[in-house]
Image: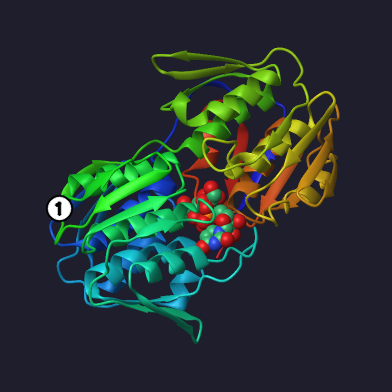
Amino acid sequence: MDQIRIIGGSPLHGVVEVGGAKNAALPILAASLLGGGECIIDHVPQVRDVITMTKLLALLGVEVQAEGERVMLEASNVQSIEAPYDLVKTMRASILALGPLLTRLGEAKVSLPGGCAIGTRPVNLHLKGLAMMGAEVRVEHGYIHAKASRLKGARIDLDFPTVTGTENLIMAACLAKGTTSLHHVAREPEIADLCAFLVKRGAKISGAGTDTITIEGVSELQGAKHWVMPDRVEAGTFVMAGAITGGDLTVKGCVTDHLGNLFTKIQEMGVKLAEHAEGVRVRRTAPLQAVEVKTLPYPGFPTDLQAQMMALMSVAEGTSVMTETIFEGRFLHVPELQRMGASIEVDGPHAVVKGISALTGAPVMASDLRASAGLVLAGLAAEGETTISRVYHLDRGYERLEEKLGAVGGQIQRIREVA
Ligand code: EPU
């Protein structure tokens, strides 16, 4: 297995560019299932989860062609209704095939994703919503089996604004009979991006980006071209890389509106941010200061930036508190940060971080995608050498991270496993 080796202590300088958003590309690619006609998707990040999604779509009968950041899809001949365990277990976002398959073909069989490193992650709200639209949903032999000759529009109030749950229900409602109104839904920008693509395909959607979305079902969708929004989690990770190394880094393609909460916290920590034509410039000349952060659904502080923020808190002056409210198990990076000298105590959903003057490099292990990014940031700031193993987690969602950070002065390289 590949490793990432980092020699810490070099401030990052220059311009680093953000790629397309993984969590927008995945539902948009899954939405190709909703009908025939060529879909051309640009600015698709070349990360492992995207490759897994294209594999799943090909297995279901979608003609898929990928050329760099462009993916072309044609789903006229989709016949298979089954997303098998072997693929779903490697990527939970495979659940995004459920809504489109059911509404297009009248039946879907998708393996239950099961738990993962960051929590139990049930999909009950996806299933409840589909049942309210008239689907007969059974869970048996580890599979979700849903049937409906044609889904019917309904009013659905979500108990919690689940991101992929909202996406599944929107896609299902596009071809349902009548109007669906979804309330208390997730407001993540990736959902608005998916809706923009669906509207180009002929879907009738209003309210995208708000907590109430209305979809008037149509009988079919056509092909469309779409450019995927920039990845706000990658952008936030770069902003924090500039901040933790005390550099002067410009993050190109960073959409300020998507990261309001992070920017408030980062500025509270003493980091200077300036928006200009090329992107957001991040500078730090004084020590980082402690902050209190709570993860929340958008527009709150993203859980996907929690581990990276804990790396910053570890070296900030004073005592910081991180409260994780989205995923119960998302503190697996804590023992690894402790190996690097961090002083962190976890009490339920809270982590109390007493800042120290410097982390020290150590061999550490990645446990999930964003935890890996947190360890990379810690390694960039630490004294000496850090090696991160299990970097396949990182490759699921970050595109050439070591190359991008290396080009702005980070001493970071991938050590490839010799077969
Ligand atoms: N939940 C339920 N029932 C459901 C669905 C969710 O109880 O039916 C709970 C979950 O257990 C969790 C909370 O609701 O406690 C939020 O989960 P959500 O469904 O919103 O998460 P998700 O859709 O599975 C997406 C992203 C995650 C990101 C979360 C939260 C994609 C493909 N994944 O997951 O991204 O952390 O929203 O913002 O969009 C990542 O990129 O590293 C990643 C994990």
Identify which amino acid the numbered label 1 is placed on: Gly
Q: Residue furthest front?
A: 155
Above or below for 410 versus 246 = below
> How many numbered marks appear?
1
- Observer-nearest of 217 and 20: 217
Residue 277 horizontal/vertical position (percent): 39, 14
Q: Secondary structure at mark 1?
A: loop
Q: Is residue 105 left or right of residue 390?
A: left
Above or below for 157 versus 409 = below
Is residue 409 in view from this perspective? no
Q: Is residue 277 left or right of residue 222?
A: right
- Observer-nearest of 16 and 224: 224
- Observer-nearest of 305 and 214: 214
**Pointer 1: what residue?**
223
Colour style of the rendered protein structure: rainbow
- Observer-nearest of 184 and 126: 184
Q: Residue furthest bottom?
A: 141
Residue 217 horizontal/vertical position (percent): 21, 57
Residue 404 horizontal/vertical position (percent): 50, 34
Quadrant showing the C terminus:
bottom right
Q: Which residue is depicted at the point 22% across and 45% down?
A: 199
The picture quadrant where one finds residue 323 is top right
Q: Is mark 1 within 8 Å of ligand 1?
A: no
Mark 1 neighbour class, 10 Å CA radius: few under 14, some 14 to 19, many 20 or more: many
Q: Which residue is depicted at the point 39% across and 71% down?
A: 131
Above or below for 67 versus 278 = below
Quadrant showing the N terminus:
bottom right
Q: Which residue is depicted at the point 19% across and 64% down?
A: 75
Residue 168 horizontal/vertical position (percent): 38, 59
